[in-house]
Image (cartoon, rainbow, N blue to C red):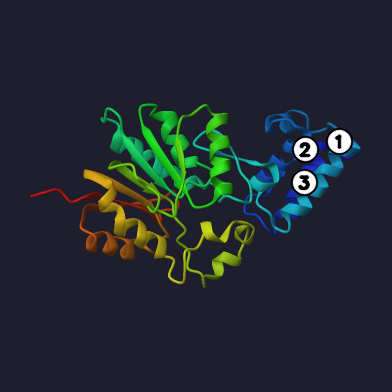
Amino acid sequence: MPDIKHQLEWATGALYSVSCSAALDSEVLLAFCLQKNRSYLLTWPEKELTSDQLGCFQQIVRKRLQPQPVAYLVGTREFYSMDLKTTPATLVPRPETEMLVDKVLELTSELEVPQILELGTGTGAISLAIKKHSAKSDILATDFSPSALNIASLNAEKHDLDITFLKSNWYQSITQGPFDVIVSNPPYIAASDPYLSQGDLPAEPVMALSSGETGLEALEIIIGQAMDFLKPEGWIVLEHGYDQQQAVTEILMQSGFEKIETLRDFNDLPRLTMATKITTK
């Protein structure tokens, strides 16, 4: 039977056409089929696969070639050192989104009981990471998708984290507040952007990627109503497209926010913009 080393070489070569991390994808998928961790693959490269293991691996590699995201194929994704359940009902958590967690933790570090609202929680990644590292935080996480909320609730239960989840179309069903921070990674890709048809994106939920023709529709709603849900000197923290910094800044200014600041991600692209509710002069 084929061994680990040669199957990894085969899969890596096959996946180069659909993935910029073909070797890593191959290791994650094979480890999943073997029910082992990736270090096992490196320790036992000459280990032969059983017929069932080989069948599992070849089938899952074919699915990856469609392409389907690795996170959907194995059912989990790591985010902020947490293993999160992930399904096609939710956006796959991205490494750059961890910046939002860092910033919210920084902004609320000196508050006794930070009141935090997350809009569009998906897998629950942002809220779960904040709660894990700030147990004192009181977090309300919303999503319009019942399926996404179910996944987020399962992730919260898995990690034993107490978060309130609510089905809401942005602010529509929210009766709590005001909040110290509103945080969101909303859909921000323009509907006509060819990027939506590239790579793994066609397999992800469109409503979690695009909110309309400009890609700014959700951001406009979130920013436009934020003042009504923020405490004085409260903060809004948003992820957006690399080419949307100016537009997001202008929307924040028009809505009366101040101390507007944009941070760059690990690719040196403007990815996160934050601002505070204007205070009484």
Expressed as whole percent of the image width and height from the top left, the position of residue 234 reads: 25, 44
Give the alpha-carbon distance from disc 2 to disc 1, as whole Å: 10 Å
Q: Which mark is residue 89?
A: none
Q: Nearer the viewer, residue 16 or 270?
A: 270
Task: Identify the residue shown where x is 26% and y is 30%.
Answer: 110
Task: Identify the residue shown where x is 46% and y is 44%.
Answer: 166
Q: Nearer the viewer, residue 108 or 266?
A: 108
For badge 3, the amino acid type reads Glu
Expressed as whole percent of the image width and height from the top left, the position of residue 203 reads: 64, 58
Of label 2 and label 1, which has the lower sequence position?
2
Give the alpha-carbon distance from disc 2 to disc 3, as whole Å: 16 Å
Of label 3 and label 1, which has the lower sequence position?
3
Residue bearing the label numbered 3: 9
Q: Nearer the viewer, residue 199 or 254?
A: 254
Task: Identify the residue shown where x is 65% and y is 55%.
Answer: 19
Q: Which mark is residue 49?
A: 1
Q: Residues within 10 Å of mark 3 (few under 14, many from 20)?
A: some
Nearest to the eye among marks 2 and 3: give it: 2
For badge 2, the amino acid type reads Cys
Q: Specify whether 30 is left or right of 119.
A: right
SS class, disc 1 = loop
For the residues labelled 3 and 1, say whether their Cβ atoms are less than 8 Å apart: no
Q: Which quadrant, please, contains the N terminus?
A: top right
Number of numbered discs overlaid on the protein picture = 3
Which of the 4 image quarters holds residue 67? bottom right
SS class, disc 2 = helix
Residue bearing the label numbered 2: 33
Which of the 4 image quarters holds residue 133? top left
For badge 1, the amino acid type reads Leu
Give the alpha-carbon distance from disc 3 to disc 1, as whole Å: 14 Å
Task: Judge whether 30 appears above or below 240 on screen.
Answer: above
Task: Identify the residue shown where x is 44% and y is 66%.
Answer: 215
